Image: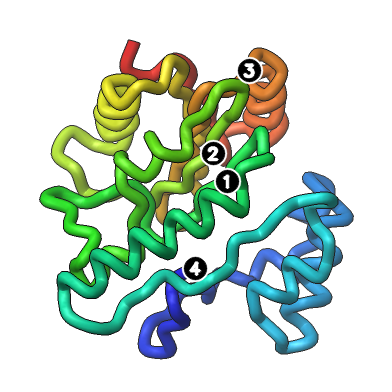
């Protein structure tokens, strides 16, 4: 988890919680719990964990190291990552939710803002037989456009050892993708059904990089 940043406007998109006629039907229980948390004015990740939105989930909520010299941050991040990997060892589905998504060009784990991204090497380390990964990625201004970017990452992730790479792309506000890595047939079918239900707000992009 990246330390809170008070200077930016992250998290400002909450108007949908006051439009139940438009959004609540997609998942009424989730909608009601999120609205309760926001209306209470206690907007902390710990509140989402306490709400038990994902029963039996294991949360790795330690803040990613951001202080010290570059070499110190590299070492601290490695220790932080290994502790998280050990905690999630029994999980057959791992969801990684970095602030910005997949690694930037010339990624350096010791960079001051590196904690906003997850590296390909870290995803490889999380890969395990029988495990699926879901990875958040905020789409960028990559030349070629958003659909080209999905294909680009599909190729990179397949080169990194993931046999199946699919994605759900959400378009409300700024575009973001949820990459599904090594998902089984049931998970892929559910993702496709989810996109059908959401229409053009959530689109399904299977078999990327093949």
Q: Residues within 10 Å of mark 2 (few under 14, many from 20)?
A: many
What residue would you read off at disc 2? 134
Under tag 3, what secondary structure?
A: loop
Residue 95: mark: 1
Above or below: residue 8 compared with residue 209: below
Query: What number of labels is visible?
Result: 4
What residue would you read off at disc 3? 184
Q: Is residue 151 visible?
A: no
Horizontal and vertical percent position of residue 176: 44, 47
Is 113 situated left or right of 105 in this image?
Answer: right
Under tag 1, what secondary structure?
A: strand
Q: Residues within 10 Å of mark 3 (few under 14, many from 20)?
A: few
Is 129 situated left or right of 4 in this image?
Answer: right
What is the quadrant of residue 29 in the picture? bottom right
Residue nearest the observer in this picture, 28 or 62: 62
Residue 1: mark: 4
Say whether disc 3 or disc 2 marks the residue closer to the N-terminus: 2
Horizontal and vertical percent position of residue 173: 47, 57
């Amino acid at each position: 988890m990246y330390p809170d940043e008070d200077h930016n406007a992250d998290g400002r998109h909450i108007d949908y919680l006051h439009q139940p006629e438009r959004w609540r039907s997609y998942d009424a229980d989730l909608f009601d719990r999120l609205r309760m948390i926001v209306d209470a004015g206690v907007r902390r990740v710990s509140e989402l964990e306490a709400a038990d939105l994902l029963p039996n989930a294991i949360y790795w909520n330690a803040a990613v190291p951001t202080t010290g010299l570059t070499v110190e941050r590299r070492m601290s991040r490695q220790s932080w990552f290994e502790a998280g990997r050990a905690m999630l060892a029994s999980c057959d589905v791992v969801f990684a939710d970095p602030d910005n998504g997949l690694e930037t060009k010339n990624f350096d784990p010791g960079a001051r803002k590196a904690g906003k991204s997850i590296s390909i090497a870290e995803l490889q380390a999380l890969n395990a037989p029988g495990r699926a990964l879901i990875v958040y990625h905020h789409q960028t201004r990559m030349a070629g456009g958003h659909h080209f970017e999905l294909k680009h990452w599909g190729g990179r992730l397949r080169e990194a050892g993931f046999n199946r790479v699919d994605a759900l792309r959400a378009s409300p506000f700024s575009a973001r993708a949820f990459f599904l890595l090594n998902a089984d047939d049931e998970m892929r079918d559910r993702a496709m059904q989810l996109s059908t239900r959401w229409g053009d707000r959530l689109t399904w992009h299977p078999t990327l990089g093949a």
